[in-house]
């Protein structure tokens, strides 16, 4: 699984740059060369956006064999630093709930609980804090996933930026279910739950004070009920689920290709993009394939269940515009290739540096 | 449980100040008047530093009765913003592990897993980041609690302060064990695992570049093995465990008094304080009762098991200087009173504002 980066991190003299947080190649390198060696364990090394864990009496406390658990614990954590904190279609509060609920749901688990750690900057308006926390509470109730523990720290003026929220999600997954980034198989279908780029463009347009003719809204949403609807029709046939957040569809497909040691071939014409997102991306010099989403998922499933899963997605409010965008293929290079609209074909690489900092 | 604050938060025009993060009265008010109403649920309302949760197939997914679980899930989360990030006896990395392991252990649970969210500032030295993450890994291995999921975000220069780490801990507690802040009973003994103030004074002396004759070190440590040793001698008799971090011994005792609706009477002469901490506090104008600890715990237990629990504490490397510092008494005002060294008696109030910002 070793990725050849152009050069190794210069840990002695190097510094953190914005690219290290953008979810692309630089982020992956930082994780591989700095975080993983220090914190190494099989759960972390799996490389998904959440971890699957046995739960029950630890061996340290018991001399008897641990009882067989009927399910596994799934956990994910996420720091949320989106700027600005209020944007069309959402805010930092609901984003923090949705992002973590989704990471748990993407392993096929049912999210049960959230925890939230707030890092506040001295001088931040209490009214804004209340609005963010109320939005968080609303999103949590709507998703049916309560925030069960929290913590608040305050740093001096100029040492933070209003409010950062780190959330952790805990979910339950039935024993035997195997859905993660390593399960994609040659011949599998690649499905996408709807149009890409809405979140990133909505945040960026606010940040840059751009006014588009149509108001673009973030797609931020909790996807666990969509996942359950999909599992209900084909629990065994769904191999990978992942939400294409930072780094967008392109980076997420590359991550999965690498984890599963496969290639992918997608069709540009099949990937839904709203015309206003397309127009905004052109204006801003962005490629929608790399723009963050917060309410979309990629599903990779066996060819024989693809139509059924796609139908289940389209029957759900959050999957109405779902599309079959490509296939998993054999490829020793683990490339993601795209048939372009103009009958060409190109390799869709990882996001290499930062495209949009602080997008989530 | 409503606490009468001098005046309610001015949410319309108010701002976050450093006192809101200090763990005293202002923190409690922010939680009660802003966070709790927005995120309200019974787990959060319990008011402990961790939450006890049922774990298993959610009712939403099953029409049959959920299986009776042999244990509960315990979770806690914490933001770590200590400044400076390196201090005598520890650093941000090990502190982030110990703090969260301890919050889980204080409900009598065995910590199983940690997650970590890193918020990095652009320009932060990779060498410092590596040192912090390696320290975290070392502390996690030493405690036997792996970091199973993580996330990294980067904010622009001047929008953060090097590195903040938010950790979430997940633990397992045998069914039937009841240890939390509401269980203190009149007549219970109050035990303390060792001398107070070491962590706060160690951090502050570094921050203020004070050189004391003796080098003071933070007491940062994972306390779960100490807790297990105590439970082994008196699982039923231990009613409350809590680590006196932000706000110190005084604030923590007040929190418990309020949660359990009792009073407390402690003896100043019985509270261990190292002479060098006492001297440093005098110099800095601090009261050691309010200074943060990161490797101490308070245990409130039935009088008939107190000697046994104290002996178990003293037999453990992290409880060698444990002491019996007072008793739980009846008091409608829920005051913590202290018999002073000079035969007087005074009320030991909550920390009212900020004593030491960014101490953990």
Image (cartoon, coloured by chain):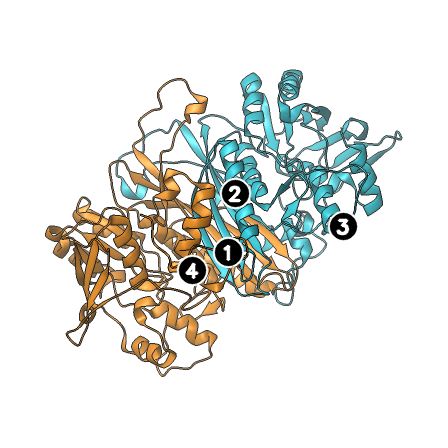
Chain colours: A orange, B cyan
Quote the CA–CA distance across marks 3 and 1.
Answer: 32 Å
Position of A122 with respect to A346 (left or right) is right
On whether disc 4 and disc 2 are found on a single subunit, the reply is no
For mark 3, what is the residue? B209
Which quadrant would residue A264 be assigned to in this image?
Answer: bottom left
Q: Which residue position is annotated with label 4?
A: A95
**Spot occupied by residue B343 in the image (x, y as percentages of width and height):** 88, 29
Q: Quadrant of residue A290?
A: bottom left
Helix, strand, or loop for circle 3? loop
3 or 1: mark nearer the eye:
3
Front label number (4 vs 3): 3
Q: CA distance from mark 1 to mark 2?
A: 24 Å
Q: Residue furthest left?
A: A304
Q: Nearer the viewer, residue A60 or B142?
A: B142
Mark 3 neighbour class, 10 Å CA radius: few under 14, some 14 to 19, many 20 or more? few
**Residue B282, image x and y in percent?**
84, 42
- Check the residue under mark 1 and report the chain it is in: A
Residue lying furthest right in this view? B342
Q: CA distance from mark 2 to mark 3?
A: 25 Å
Residue A159 placement, left or right of A243: right
Residue B349 located left or right of residue B123: right
- Per the image, the residue denoted by label 2 is B134
Which one is in front in this view, the residue at disc 4 or the one at disc 2? 2
Q: Which one is in front in this view, the residue at disc 1 or the one at disc 2?
A: 2
* Residues at circles 2 and 3 in contact by the CB criterion of under 8 Å: no
Would residue A41 be seen by someone viewing this image from the given angle? yes
- Residue at numbered disc 1: A165
Quarter of the image with the C terminus of chain A is bottom left
> Gap between marks 4 and 3, in whole Å?
41 Å
> What subunit carries mark 3?
B
Label 2 vs 3, first from the N-terminus: 2
């Amino acid at each position: 699984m070793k990725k050849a980066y152009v050069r190794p991190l210069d840990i002695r003299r190097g510094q953190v740059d914005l690219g290290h947080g953008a979810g692309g190649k630089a982020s992956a390198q930082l994780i591989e060369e700095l975080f993983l060696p220090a914190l190494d364990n099989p759960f972390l090394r799996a490389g998904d956006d959440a971890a699957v864990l046995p739960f029950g009496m630890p061996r340290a406390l018991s001399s008897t064999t641990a009882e067989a658990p009927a399910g596994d614990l799934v956990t994910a954590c996420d720091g949320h630093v989106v700027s600005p904190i209020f944007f069309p279609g959402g805010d930092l509060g609901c984003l923090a709930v949705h992002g973590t609920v989704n990471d748990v749901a993407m392993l096929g688990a049912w999210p049960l609980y959230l925890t939230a750690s707030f890092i506040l900057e001295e001088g931040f308006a209490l009214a804004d804090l209340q609005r963010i926390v109320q939005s968080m509470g609303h999103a949590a109730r709507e998703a049916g996933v309560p925030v069960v523990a929290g913590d608040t720290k305050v740093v001096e003026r100029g040492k933070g930026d209003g409010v950062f929220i780190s959330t952790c999600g805990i979910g339950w997954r039935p024993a035997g279910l195997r859905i993660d980034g390593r399960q994609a198989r040659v011949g599998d279908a690649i499905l996408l739950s709807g149009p890409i780029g809405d979140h990133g463009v909505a945040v960026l347009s606010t940040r840059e004070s751009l006014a588009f003719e149509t108001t673009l809204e973030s797609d931020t949403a909790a996807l666990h009920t969509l996942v359950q609807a999909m599992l209900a029709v084909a629990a065994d046939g769904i191999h990978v689920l992942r939400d294409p957040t930072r780094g967008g569809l392109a980076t997420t497909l590359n991550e999965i290709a690498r984890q599963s040691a496969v290639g992918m071939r997608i069709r540009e014409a099949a990937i839904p993009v709203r015309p206003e997102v397309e127009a905004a991306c052109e204006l801003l010099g962005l490629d929608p394939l790399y723009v963050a989403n917060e309410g979309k998922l990629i599903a990779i499933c066996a060819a024989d269940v693809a139509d059924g899963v796609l139908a289940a997605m389209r029957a759900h409010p959050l999957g109405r515009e779902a599309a079959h965008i490509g296939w998993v293929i054999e490829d020793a290079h683990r490339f993601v290739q795209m048939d372009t609209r103009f009958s060409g074909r190109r390799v869709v690489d990882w996001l290499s540096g930062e495209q949009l900092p602080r997008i989530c």
